[in-house]
Amino acid sequence: MNKTKKPRVIVVAKRSSLARLEDGEVDQRARKLLRSGDATVRKWRPAHEDHVRTLERVEKTLSRLGAEVLILHGSHAVFDTRGSDLVVSVGGDGTLLAASHSVSGVPILGVNSAPRYSVGFFCGAKGRAVEAQLARALSGELPQMKLSRMAVRINGQLRSERVLNEALICHIDPAATSNYILEFGKRSEEQKSSGIWVGTAAGSTGALRSAGGEIMPFGSRQLQFVVREPYVAGGRNYKLTRGLVPSTRTLIVKSKMHHARVFLDGPYRALPVRLGDHVQFETSRDPLTVLGLEPSR
């Protein structure tokens, strides 16, 4: 990083369930459940307290290191990284994933703010190591890993090029059958299923794996697709139920549904898909640089 000026850091902090409850964004029935110690919300308060302490540690450390800091509260905040040196996500993997959709050209360091309660597979800092990892990030001493991302086009129009984990294309109603034509290379197949997962190497350890896919090396630029719960009748078997998509190729889904969605990295970014729409998945030209990840992951 440039030693002649103050480093500019964008901090994206999640808002805990307890904080959202206090702001009236969560079903107020949760208050009664909290008072009664119900198991469904029992972790909310200790997780919130851990998160607050970690965020305070991050703020104090960056101030001590002389950084110019912009703090955004809310995982899905939209921001511009131009002129910044580093993005720090404070939460878990979900916070890093959400923030990554605004990140281009600068590295991101994930801080797992409540390791006892959240998953931090992509987070390179947690607990007492936060101070040291932040200092190393600003000095350029933390190991870097470039993770391939995915681009999604609908009818040829680019809709996102920063999908880090996976996309799910399916009927808008999860109980309804997804009807579509899947095209890969010279092969084309009409299918009925619960939808299709398409993801990157980074996303291969999550939903893709759970659906029957394989774990890919982090450095791979290939995509992978897995059809969810394919419906076959009359002894017919589909040929295109799973596979790897080279970085130079495109996977195409032609919708036979009037009301469908393609969900990008979870439920919060959803693009409408109509009858006859062509949805294309390909390797993005905009990878994400993540700090503090071990090569063995």
Image (cartoon, rainbow, N blue to C red):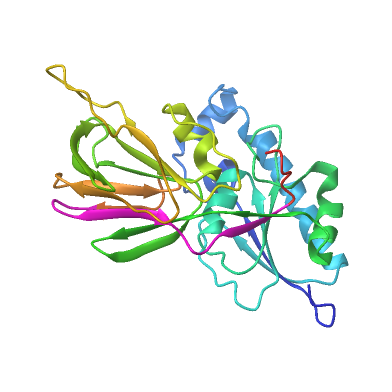
Above or below, 48 against 283 in this view is above
**Residue 226 appearing in the image:** no
Q: Position of residue 41 (x, y in %)?
A: 56, 29
Viewer-proximal residue among 47 and 213: 213
View extreme (top): residue: 235
Tally of numbered tags: 0
> In the rendered view, does 147 fall on the left or right side of 157?
right
> In the rendered view, does 210 fall on the left or right side of 226?
right
Q: Position of residue 98 (x, y in %)?
A: 52, 53
> In the rendered view, does 286 fall on the left or right side of 66?
left
Q: Quadrant of the N terminus?
A: bottom right
Viewer-proximal residue among 271 and 163: 163
Above or below, 187 against 208 in this view is below
Q: Does 106 lie within the magenta span?
A: no
View extreme (bottom): residue: 4
> In the rendered view, does 18 fall on the left or right side of 255?
right
Q: Position of residue 153 (x, y in %)?
A: 32, 60
Q: Does 277 lie within the magenta span?
A: yes
Give the residue displayed 31% in from the left and 32% down from the top: 241
Give the residue displayed 59% in from the left and 71% down from the top: 81
Viewer-proximal residue among 196 and 8: 196
Give the residue displayed 34% in from the left and 65% down from the top: 158
View extreme (front): residue: 186
Q: Position of residue 236 (x, y in %)?
A: 17, 22
Q: Quadrant of the C terminus?
A: top right
Extent of the magenta region: 273-291
**Residue 270 appearing in the image:** yes
